Each structure stands twice: as C-alpha cells, then as structure tokens.
Amino acid sequence: MQPNSPSAEQILNQVRQLYELYPFPPQPVGTVPPPGWNWRWSWPQAHAFCTGSHPGRRKVRILDAGCGSGVGTEYIAHQNPNAEIWAFDLSSRALEIAEARCRASQAPPVQFRQLNVYDIDQLPGQFDFINCVGVLHHLPDPLAGLQALAGKLAPGGLLHLFVYG
Ligand SMILES: C[S@@+](CC[C@H](N)C(=O)[O-])C[C@H]1O[C@@H](n2cnc3c(N)ncnc32)[C@H](O)[C@@H]1O
C-alpha cells in the first residue's frame, strides 16, 4: 500500500457514506411488478444458459449481494416466486428503499440484512444462485470479496457477477 493511501476501513466507510447519501439506483418505487423479464435473474433460465439443462427444482436459495435500492432484488423476487430470497447491503438507506420497493409491488418475501460482504458468513447456509452487480469494485480487496461470495455458493450453484470497467 502507498504511504498515503486510505486504509481498508476508510474505504468501506467512504463507500457506505456515499450510498447512505445517494442510494443506488435512484429509480422511484413503483406499485406494480417491474416491466418485462430479465433472464439473468431467472433461476431456471440462467441455469439453462450456463449448463444447457433445466435445473429440475425451483425451491432454491437466492442471494442478492449488495442489493442497493433493490431494483434487481425486486426482479429476482418476482421472477423466482418459489425461491427463498435473501438480500444485503452496506447502506441502511438503500435497504430501506429496497424493502419499500419490494413491499409496494407485492413481491414474494425477501430477507433483507445490513451486512458487509466480507461478513457474509453471518448469513445461514449456502445459496444456489448469487447475484452481485456493481459491488466488488468498491471493495478494498475485491478478490477477498469474490472469495467470500464463492464460499457461500452451494455445489453446482451459479454466481452472476458484474463489475464496472
Ligand atoms: C452501484 S450499487 C449497485 C446496487 C445494485 N446491486 C444494483 O445493481 O442496482 C453498489 C452497492 O454496493 C453496496 N456495497 C458496496 N460495498 C459493499 C460491501 N462491502 N458490502 C455490502 N455492500 C456493499 C453499496 O452500498 C451499494 O448499494
């Protein structure tokens, strides 16, 4: 680390403050399910795309890691009504909006938690499908974040990952 570069704790605090002030994405909360269908957030379709086969079961556990204000979470909940869905974020304000968003469109239940991705082991069990969009590049150690996510993936599970270039 450079002599004047911020510590890991400073980076996490700055990221948290940013998203407490500006929860992302800023889309307003609607009252109806999200428009359209996004195959990346549909367990059977993502499974078929990645493996060429139907998963066979729909009662899976899905995690939205760094869910922000819940636009993706809302899609995931509506598109996987038989799944057990969890979502977490560092920002309490983003989580409030995410919960309000899912409630307003009567999405299937989502367990929301305020959590640092490095503390993901605090969540029970493993997940068949982990969605992590726009998060890892914010971490002081992105590889450690990726390893934390991988550690919560069930055997044969899918990780949908997106980072900013
Ligand atoms: C660009 S937003 C993406 C939100 C959402 N995934 C989406 O695509 O709409 C990044 C989110 O990652 C969260 N985040 C950043 N670092 C995190 C960490 N260490 N643990 C948990 N969440 C984190 C932020 O609070 C923010 O809500």
Image (spheres, rainbow, N blue to C red):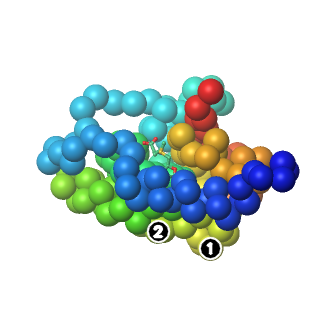
User: Residue 69 placed where, x, y %?
Assistant: 36, 51
Left or right, 35 with reference to 41: left
User: Residue 150 placed where, x, y %?
Assistant: 72, 51
Q: Depth check: 86 or 27 in front?
A: 27
Residue 71, image quadrant: top left
Q: Quadrant of the C terminus?
A: top right
Element type where label 1 sits in the image: helix
Residue type marked 1: Gln
Task: Name the residue that disc number 2 marks.
Answer: 113
Element type where label 2 sits in the image: strand
Q: Depth check: 81 or 24 in front?
A: 24
Q: Is residue 126 visible?
A: no
Residues tagged 2 and 1 counted as in contact (Cβ below 8 A): yes
Task: Name the residue that disc number 1 marks.
Answer: 122
Left or right, 59 with reference to 129: left
User: Residue 54 placed where, x, y %?
Assistant: 55, 34
- Please tell me the numbered disc located at residue 70: none
Q: Residue at x 37, y 50 (%)?
A: 22
Residue 52, image quadrant: top right
Q: Is residue 8 visible?
A: yes
